Amino acid sequence: MSEKEYKVPEPTLRRLPWYLAYAQLVQKSGELYLSSTQIAANIAVDASKVAKDLSYVNISGRTRVGYDVNELVKVLEEFLGFTKSHKAFLFGVGSLGGALMHDIGLKHFGLEIVAGFDVKYELAGTSINRIPIHHVDSFEELQKKTGVNIGILTVPIDKAQEVAEMMIAGGIQAIWNFTPFRIRVPENIVVQNTSIYAHLAVMFNRLNELNQSK
Amino acid sequence: MSEKEYKVPEPTLRRLPWYLAYAQLVQKSGELYLSSTQIAANIAVDASKVAKDLSYVNISGRTRVGYDVNELVKVLEEFLGFTKSHKAFLFGVGSLGGALMHDIGLKHFGLEIVAGFDVKYELAGTSINRIPIHHVDSFEELQKKTGVNIGILTVPIDKAQEVAEMMIAGGIQAIWNFTPFRIRVPENIVVQNTSIYAHLAVMFNRLNELNQSK
């Protein structure tokens, strides 16, 4: 799952959006050029790391002036997949699932949730933020019609494995797993775990230690 | 920011919620005991790592039978801070901010958003999910009244640094940063970065490589 050989390392892919965010800020301020040293200094990442990360992206800077800001923003957005529209299905229209359907920010970053699925019959036929919700029984048919291959998993933990298997059987190739449950999937399936509640645990602990050390 | 000396390592804190989720599943199935080997096998983490991680938590297993499942769930929930109610303010009631205010899941994991703040005057006096929204000018006063020390940052990237500084000046000690912008903060401030859009970039890239290798 995590140890596959990929061309671009995950830490690089996670840092590139930071550089993009900073480049967008510089772009807004009207500056035309941006160096990797400047990026590094402003977001507290080692300059050599910034340069190495950017070497995966097809852009070259000019000696002494750095990268063309507009080009850097454009190339990074494209490289990260934010300019393409990736269609996704969402499974489990509970509180978190509904919240994600409300977030139009995802669309700006290239992810368009085109339908939600739930086991609750009373949800079928309703919609959130103009995204239709269907009973999960319609998933396979809709997948065949649309070819959607990204699935967002926001079901309760005791359903996570079962629903993941159903998603894969129905043609989903990439699962964005928001549950804290570690799903098991075949090798050819991409899983991205985003457990926001695990981040909460880290924050609570650090805050606790901070206040105890006073 | 990340290199401080903490009692519990961050990777451990990130894995413990996985064990909790699995233990909850086992608890639901009616099993009474759970061993670290069993946890390890089911969530694809090394057994010695599971045992090491659990050594930070105040629980001891019995030889051959393992941990008491009910106790494990209870102790983990407490250790991770999910049983306490931590009050938080949210800054930037845009799409993502509003989505987080909709997510009642946060409450189950110990975080209660008690107010949202925004610069838009037309939002002041409204509410989302019964959480009141105030103009950001009222923040300092409300912080003094309530003592809330956790702030969720969901403003646009070009406001992230400025708002973070205002939060800190007003008494916020821990910032849950959902922007892709790397904010700079004093040493005694806890920052938890959760850039869900960066996770999207990783998923898009992996899916792309997967389909190119076919």
Image (spheres, coloured by chain):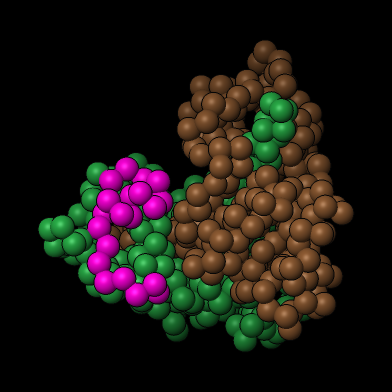
Chain colours: A green, B brown
Q: Is residue A42 magenta?
A: yes
Residue A17, quarter of the rendered image: bottom left
Nearer the observer, B49 or A50: A50
The answer to whether residue B122 is visible is: yes
Residue found at the far top of this picture: B63
Where is residue A121? Give x, y as percent.
74, 77
When the figure is inspected, residue B174 is found, relative to residue A170, above or below; the finding is: above
Where is residue B179? Give x, y as percent.
52, 61
Nearer the observer, A97 or B89: B89
Nearer the observer, B114 or A110: B114
Q: Is residue B188 magenta?
A: no
Q: Residue at x 81, y 42 (%)?
A: B84
When the figure is inspected, residue A47 is found, relative to residue B48, above or below; the finding is: below
Q: Which residues are magenta?
A: A28-47
Q: Quadrant of the C terminus of chain A?
A: top right
Residue B80, quarter of the rendered image: top right
Residue found at the far left of this picture: A63
Where is residue A150? Give x, y as percent.
45, 68
Residue found at the far right of this picture: B145
Nearer the observer, B131 or B137: B137
When the figure is inspected, residue A45 is found, relative to residue B133, above or below; the finding is: above
Where is residue A112? Give x, y as percent.
49, 77
Q: Residue at x 72, y 21 (%)?
A: B59
Q: Residue at x 36, y 45 (%)?
A: A45
